[in-house]
Image (tube, helix red, strand yellow):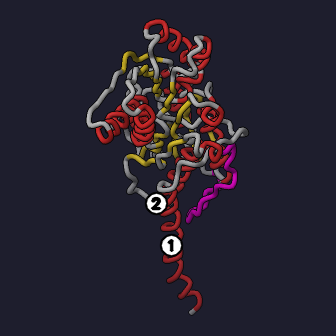
């Protein structure tokens, strides 16, 4: 009788475990946005299946930026905390190398491929190759062409974050005229375009609410290639061509952290306000705490995105298939009022 009862209860127990696992990320996606620690080794998920020895592959476009390093570390630690094997490949900033790196992970037979594509179109065929091999692909941080074969995209809410930052800037200026320089990452980047859209929408919507009209004066856009050096050079050029700029809006902290050197050298730190649509980088948060000219940034936590990505892979392994095509961490604006709460000097990013 006990044996028969055990057989009857076992399927119910397995379903309960799977339901718990599936519910975990859906709950987390509603509360994300405030994680920016340097480690997350305690993140372990419930799983109906034994995860021991399963292989999670991660392909990064590069490791030459703190954000990429923090994301890499988060995925690695979360994977290993759940008893799985972490395999990685570095695109080294070259699209052909990233394609080859992904193909290598597929050849090694990973059980899930986490992909941060350098280009939204160039990696489409790689996702189809993985699909033919029975490997689910999860797009993380960035975006990919909808024609790709992938389970879901996991990233911060770039549009909503940008809107929060733009709204803050509009409130700060009020009826005072904005002369805006936009510092972008690189042309055509889908994440950058979404952040830019959010920033501009936030400014115009707040102006319409409070002023009844739009006074959006973007005098230039400069590209930084998502680097400190690129940001400094871009800002130097901007200040020569448009010395009257009083607001710099940017798609990422990294785009403007180098630009600060150019602003300081020109003696304009008291004349130019900086507003970032992402990422919550620790250097940016420190500036927000210590100055009045780095106004705000929005949280794009590589730690949280890494956790969510591995959790999604675990859910897939446990049988979940009804993923939304996009999963977001919660939008969060960081200003002087709350910056200390999110500043972690020991964080990688």
> Can you say whether 287 is above or below 180 in the image?
below
- Residue found 39% across the figure and 24% down from its top: 178
Q: As drawn, is 330 to the left or to the right of 41?
A: left
Question: Percent from the top left, x then y, of residue 10?
Answer: 53, 78
Residue bearing mark 1? 16
Looking at this view, is 88 or 120 the one in front? 120
Q: Nearer the viewer, residue 67 or 291?
A: 291
The residue furthest left is 213
Provide the secondary structure element on which disc 1 rests: helix
Instruction: Work out how far the residue at label 1 is from the one at label 2, CA to CA, in angstroms.
Output: 13 Å
Name the outermost residue toward the front: 175
Image quadrant of residue 184? top left
Local crowd size for mark 1, using a 10 Å CA cut-off: few (<14), some (14–19), many (≥20): few
In the displayed structure, does residue 242 sit left or right of residue 28? left
Q: Can you tell which mark lies on residue 319?
A: 2
The C terminus is located in which quarter?
top right
The residue drawn where x is 45% and y is 34% is: 172
| Magenta span includes 47 | yes
- The residue at 63%/57% (across/down) is 44
Of all residues, the one furthest to the right in this rendering is: 346
Residue 173, horizontal then vertical, whole percent:
42, 31
- Identify the magenta region: 37-53
Q: Can you give x and y, in whole percent of width and height, for residue 338 in the image?
A: 59, 46
- Upstream in sequence: badge 1 or badge 2: 1
Judge depth for marks 1 and 2 and give the one in front. Answer: 1
- Image point 41% across, 26% down: which residue? 189
348 part of magenta stretch: no
């Amino acid at each position: 009788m006990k044996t028969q009862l055990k057989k009857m209860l076992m399927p119910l127990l397995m379903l309960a475990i799977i339901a718990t696992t599936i519910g975990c990320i859906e709950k987390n996606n509603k509360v994300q946005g405030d994680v920016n620690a340097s480690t997350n080794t305690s993140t372990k998920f419930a799983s109906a299946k034994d995860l021991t020895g399963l292989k999670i592959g991660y392909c990064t476009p590069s490791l030459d930026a703190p954000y990429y390093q923090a994301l890499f570390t988060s995925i690695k630690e979360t994977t290993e905390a759940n008893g799985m094997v972490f395999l990685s490949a570095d695109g080294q900033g070259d699209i052909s190398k990233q394609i080859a790196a992904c193909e290598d992970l597929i050849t090694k037979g990973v059980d899930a491929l986490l992909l941060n594509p350098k280009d939204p179109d160039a990696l489409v065929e790689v996702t189809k190759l993985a699909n033919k091999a029975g490997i689910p692909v999860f797009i993380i941080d960035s975006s990919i062409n909808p024609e790709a074969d992938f389970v879901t995209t996991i990233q911060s809410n770039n549009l909503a974050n940008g809107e929060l930052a733009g709204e803050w800037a509009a409130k700060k200026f009020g009826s005072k005229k904005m002369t805006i320089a936009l510092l972008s990452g690189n042309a055509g980047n889908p994440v950058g375009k979404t952040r830019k859209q959010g920033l501009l929408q936030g400014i115009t919507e707040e102006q319409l609410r409070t002023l009844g009209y739009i006074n959006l004066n973007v005098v230039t856009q400069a590209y930084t290639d998502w680097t400190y050096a690129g940001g400094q050079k871009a800002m130097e050029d901007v200040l020569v061509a448009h010395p009257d700029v009083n607001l710099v809006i940017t798609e990422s902290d990294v785009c403007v952290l180098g630009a600060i050197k150019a602003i300081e050298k020109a003696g304009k730190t008291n004349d130019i306000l900086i507003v970032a649509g992402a990422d919550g980088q620790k250097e940016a948060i420190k500036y927000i705490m210590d100055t009045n000219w780095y106004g705000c940034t929005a949280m794009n936590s590589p730690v949280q995105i890494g956790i969510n990505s591995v959790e999604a892979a675990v859910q897939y392994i446990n049988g979940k298939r009804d993923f939304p095509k996009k999963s977001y961490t919660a939008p969060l604006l960081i200003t002087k009022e709350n910056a200390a709460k999110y500043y972690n000097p020991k964080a990688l990013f």
